[in-house]
């Protein structure tokens, strides 16, 4: 029998503006992009639109809207955006 880990309380909340700490790449979740393709550039500003969890580990997962894309992120991939920081473009990798 597989026991689920208890959910860890998320550090960030819905509606929070965050910044991508690194380039965010396709893990295979986006079939219209090649595996490993850059989806969002490091430094892109987004907004958390939903908070969930990984079932097996209880780790928080954040759905972050970067421009026209919504990408699943973990806490080590994002950080709170400084007040007044605005995106320079739609967040998509170029």
Image (cartoon, rainbow, N blue to C red):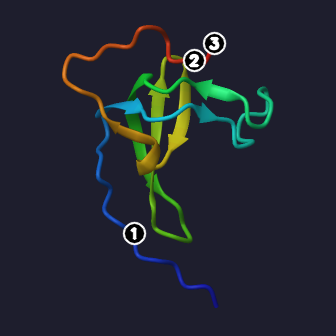
Q: Nearer the viewer, mark 1 or mark 3?
A: 3
Q: Nearer the viewer, mark 2 or mark 1?
A: 2
Q: Residue at x 79, y 33 (%)?
A: 31
- Say above or below: 54 vs 23: below
Marks 2 and 1 sit apart, C-alpha to C-alpha, by 31 Å
Q: How many marks?
A: 3
Disc 2, disc 3: CB below 8 Å? yes
- Image quarter of residue 10: bottom left
Q: Residue 75 at what x, y percent from top left?
A: 41, 49
Reading the image, the residue beneath label 2 is 92
Q: Circle 3 — which element?
A: loop
Q: Nearer the viewer, residue 55 or 46?
A: 46
Marks 2 and 3 sit apart, C-alpha to C-alpha, by 6 Å
Reading the image, the residue beneath label 3 is 94
- Say above or below: 65 vs 27: above
Reading the image, the residue beneath label 1 is 7
Disc 1, disc 3: CB below 8 Å? no
């Amino acid at each position: 029998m597989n026991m689920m880990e208890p959910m860890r309380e998320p550090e960030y909340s819905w509606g929070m503006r965050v910044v991508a700490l690194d380039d965010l790449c396709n893990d295979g979740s986006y079939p219209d992009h090649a595996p490993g393709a850059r989806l969002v550039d490091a430094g892109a500003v987004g907004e958390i639109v939903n908070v969930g969890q990984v079932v097996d580990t209880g780790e928080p997962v954040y759905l972050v809207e970067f421009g026209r894309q919504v990408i699943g992120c973990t806490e080590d991939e994002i950080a709170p955006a400084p007040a007044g920081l605005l995106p320079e473009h739609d967040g998509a990798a170029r």
